[in-house]
């Protein structure tokens, strides 16, 4: 969309405010709203100033001035504000007009530019399946003398005996029993449908929605693939609309990967492929799962660099509460066709040549999508460049249920890092593939490691309630 088209849309929709947004290192969105009367062509040419020192992981106070440069192609009307508001995503620049190397959105764009100069293809397409929970109540604290959390959901398995006004109506979702039941077991059909309606109005093409495996309101909405940066924009839009629609229904949505003990967590399975113009490059009839040699090399890159990648695709201490065997968590660094126990799955059901793709199942939605998608693309391109053969490297294919292998067979399979600290160490040791073409910089990676290690330490030094159960009577 041109800048003139955006200005015409402001008039057509009687927009009163324009909301300029950017995404920080952790993947959280920030915004500044301007009256629509103050927005003109100059706003898109000169940008909107903000204080970078107030954003964690960005700038020091001595160099705090930064500029949001609006992307006219990213606009949509906010469905929640009382005053008609237009949302615009922005890239971050320094005051002297240089693209900021810690801006996640700019890193995603540089990854796309690197693909185009690599000679491999012209476009990388991504489609995340981002799961979430919808709760009725959430409480938590972590203080000097207290540490606790509490969540509740009217459909949760633990509420079969809860006394409610008018009586308990039953039909609760069993633990691990929530995959696609109909109402009244699935109590959130209308809520998810409303989310889908608002997402469609905001420009996303919705493919389907359903209840997911876990009890207590786990759901999933799938939207259509797009190019790398646009998909990251769409995921931020998706999370914004899911969060705020739940709030309108008097509920709360979370993309936290493991909010409940003893049931499945929420992942973000990421489908990805490369095209050259309109030609899909991952399809070759007769190959393993009809995958081309290029696609297999891409898989080789993903699996070879997976321990480092996971520092960006699963960047929270809570991520590793999900990445444990027994809860459909893809902890095994192998590939397979159709097998959901592998870290990399090749979908084979109803797949056309243009739909031929790789699915990396390990990530979760605590990831900053701009960084995670860029890192996955860089790992895959490194695999293509170096012709990494995933079979020769010992990554499969494994077409059996890995959870049913013998202990001896399981020991032959490499697993994901066990902690965030391990993944950060892996990233520090294996980051050269990310800095190719200046997509990521060493300075960015060093800063990211520093921020995330401090985050991990803040959790590690806290007293856990389970420690009272284990040790208080020693």
Image (cartoon, rainbow, N blue to C red):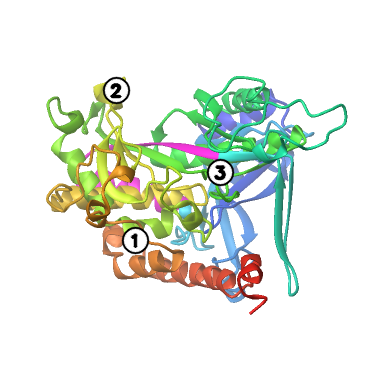
Label 1, residues with CA under 10 Å away: few <14, some 14-19, many ≥20: many
Marks 3 and 2, Cα distance to the nearest angstrom? 33 Å
User: Looking at the image, which residue is at 51% across and 47% down?
Assistant: 365
Mark 2 crowd level (few <14, some 14–19, many ≥20, 10 Å Cα):
few
In the image, 438 versus 17, the foreground residue is 438
Spot the residue most to the front.
473
Q: Are marks 3 and 2 in contact (CB under 8 Å)?
A: no
2 and 1 marks in contact (CB < 8 Å): no
Residue 441 lies in quadrant: bottom left
Distance between mark 3 and mark 1 Cα atoms = 29 Å
Magenta range = 105-131
Q: What residue did someone put label 3 on?
A: 89
Query: Which image quarter is the C terminus in?
Result: bottom right
Residue 253 rendering spot, x and y as whole percentages:
65, 41
Is there any visible trace of residue 216 in the rendered image?
yes
The residue at the far right in this view is: 165
Q: Is residue 216 left or right of residue 401?
A: right
At numbered mark 1, what does the secondary structure look like: helix, strand or loop? helix
């Amino acid at each position: 969309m041109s800048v003139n088209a955006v200005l015409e849309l402001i008039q057509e929709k009687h927009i009163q405010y324009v909301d300029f947004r950017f995404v920080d290192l952790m993947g959280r969105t920030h915004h500044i709203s301007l009256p629509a009367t103050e927005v003109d062509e100059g706003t898109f040419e000169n940008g909107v100033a903000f204080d970078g020192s107030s954003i964690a992981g960005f700038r020091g106070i001595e160099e705090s001035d930064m500029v949001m440069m609006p992307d006219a192609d990213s606009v949509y009307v906010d469905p929640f504000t009382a005053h008609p508001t237009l949302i615009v995503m922005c890239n971050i620049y320094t005051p002297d007009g240089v693209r900021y190397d810690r801006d996640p959105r700019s890193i995603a764009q540089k990854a796309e530019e690197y693909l185009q100069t690599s000679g491999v293809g012209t476009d990388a397409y991504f489609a995340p399946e981002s799961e979430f929970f919808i709760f009725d109540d959430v409480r938590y604290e972590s203080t000097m003398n207290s540490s606790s959390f509490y969540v509740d959901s009217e459909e949760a398995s633990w509420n079969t005996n809860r006394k409610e006004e008018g009586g308990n109506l039953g039909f609760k979702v069993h633990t691990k029993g929530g995959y696609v039941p109909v109402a009244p077991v699935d109590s959130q059909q209308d809520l998810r449908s409303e989310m889908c309606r608002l997402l469609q109005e905001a420009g996303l093409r919705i493919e389907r929605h359903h209840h997911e495996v876990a009890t207590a309101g786990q759901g999933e909405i799938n939207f259509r693939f797009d190019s790398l940066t646009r998909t990251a924009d769409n995921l931020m839009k998706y999370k914004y609309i899911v969060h705020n629609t739940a709030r309108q229904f008097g509920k709360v949505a979370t993309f936290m990967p493991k909010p409940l003990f003893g049931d499945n967590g929420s992942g973000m399975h990421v489908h990805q492929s490369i095209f050259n113009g309109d030609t899909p490059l991952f399809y070759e009839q007769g190959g393993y799962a009809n995958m081309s040699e290029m696609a297999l090399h891409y898989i080789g890159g993903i699996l070879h660099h997976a321990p480092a990648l996971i520092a960006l695709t699963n960047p929270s201490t809570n991520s590793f509460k999900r990445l444990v065997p027994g809860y459909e968590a893809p902890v095994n660094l192998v590939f397979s066709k159709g097998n959901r126990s592998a870290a990399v799955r090749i979908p084979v059901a109803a797949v056309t040549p243009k739909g031929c793709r790789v699915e990396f199942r390990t990530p979760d939605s605590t990831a900053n999508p701009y960084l995670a998608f860029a890192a996955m693309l860089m790992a895959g391109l490194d695999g293509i460049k170096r012709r990494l053969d995933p079979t020769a490297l010992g990554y499969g294919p494994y077409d059996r249920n890995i959870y049913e292998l013998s202990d001896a067979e399981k020991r032959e399979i490499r697993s994901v890092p066990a902690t965030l600290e391990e993944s950060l160490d892996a990233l520090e040791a294996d980051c050269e593939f990310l800095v190719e073409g200046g997509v990521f910089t060493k300075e960015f990676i060093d800063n990211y490691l520093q921020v995330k290690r401090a985050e991990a330490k803040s959790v590690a030094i806290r007293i856990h309630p389970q420690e009272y159960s284990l040790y208080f009577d020693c």
